[in-house]
Amino acid sequence: MSEFENDAGGESAGRIKKFMFVNRKAPYGTIYALEGLEVVLIAAAFDQDVSLAFVDDGVYQLAKGQQTKALEIKNFSPAYRALEGYDVEKLYAERESLEARGLAAEDLIVPVEVLSSTELAELMAVQDVVISS
Amino acid sequence: MGLELSGRTYDTDEEGYLQNLSDWSEEVANLIARQEDIDMTPNHWEVVNFLREYYTEYQIAPAIRVLTKAIGKKLGPEKGNNKYLYELFPYGPAKQACKIAGLPKPTGCV
Amino acid sequence: MLHIVNKSPYERNALESCLRLALPGAALLLIEDGVYAATRGNVAEPRLREAMQRMDIYALRPDLEARGMAGRVIQGVKLVDYDGFVDLVCERPNCQSWL
């Protein structure tokens, strides 16, 4: 985060930064997933290099066929399909997390790139900012 | 806060956005538009209806940049630009048109 | 990368996921309830010892002391105070808090 401050108004203030949002929570039991999605939509408005990673229970956020009517809360899973319109096109899911939950890429509501833990770790390491929720 | 129409009250938030999506009707839209000093023309309706379709599909109100791009894609570049949309909705297409369309305020609009 | 974990290994899988997604050479700082993972005999000890071979592992001393755990720290875990916490954040190009 220190880079944030160094860059504020500095010579590199205009540089596009790499932001990765790491989603690790299931969608309706807690507010993390919905709030995380809103942060992504806001960040996307600032023309940064935004990517999303889905790890652990976070992969459940993308499960097809969510029906929340009986819970009387909003099904926000269609919003992930809007991300493309926000120019957020880099979506990754960790293979180990999917497999541990009996899920595969075709069970998800949006196309994702499935990465191994190591591949995802390498991608995380080159981000300017990683925000986990 | 709320809107009064034909003896019924419709709940709104402090900025005048409808609380319940299902309260929306063309009459309610016309009432909100009048409060915003907007005379609804077919061009206004085209944007409002587009927003309602977008919301049905994605469950979010789009940011202005996204709205502009999506309208350009569907209705052509002469409509998918800021100038055209701001002429229709001078206080901001995302804010005013979303309000008239009965949607929540777009995420990221402060 | 500095990874920060603040949850007990008995309550959440944050530590486990963090170690799975940490590259060799990364640093791990345990804070708040995360410090229980740095104590002898806890469920995460084998994983932590294994991780120690490839990365630096730190725990926040005030959080260990508050929990009565300062005397039970696994050998090889480095203890830091708040100043050390700040240094760790500044030394690394980026950090990630595992909620």
Image: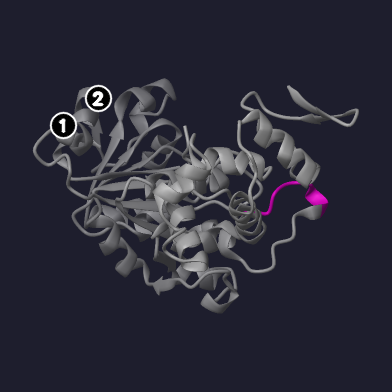
Magenta stretch, main secondary structure class: loop
User: In the visual, does C68 lie left or right of C73?
Assistant: right
Q: Which chain carries label 2?
A: C
Tell me the amino acid under the disc marked 2. Asp
**Which residue bears the numbered disc 1?**
A9
Instruction: Name the quarter where the C terminus of chain C is drawn.
Output: top left
Give the secondary structure at mark 1: loop
Give the image location of residue B71, x and y in percent: 50, 60
**Which residue bears the numbered disc 2?**
C81
Q: Name the residue at the left extreme.
A: A11
Q: Name the residue at the right extreme.
A: B7
Give the secondary structure at mark 2: loop
Q: Which chain carries label 1?
A: A
Q: Are marks 2 and 1 on the same chain?
A: no
User: In the visual, does A34 lie left or right of A95?
Assistant: right
Magenta segment boundaries in residue numbering: A70-76
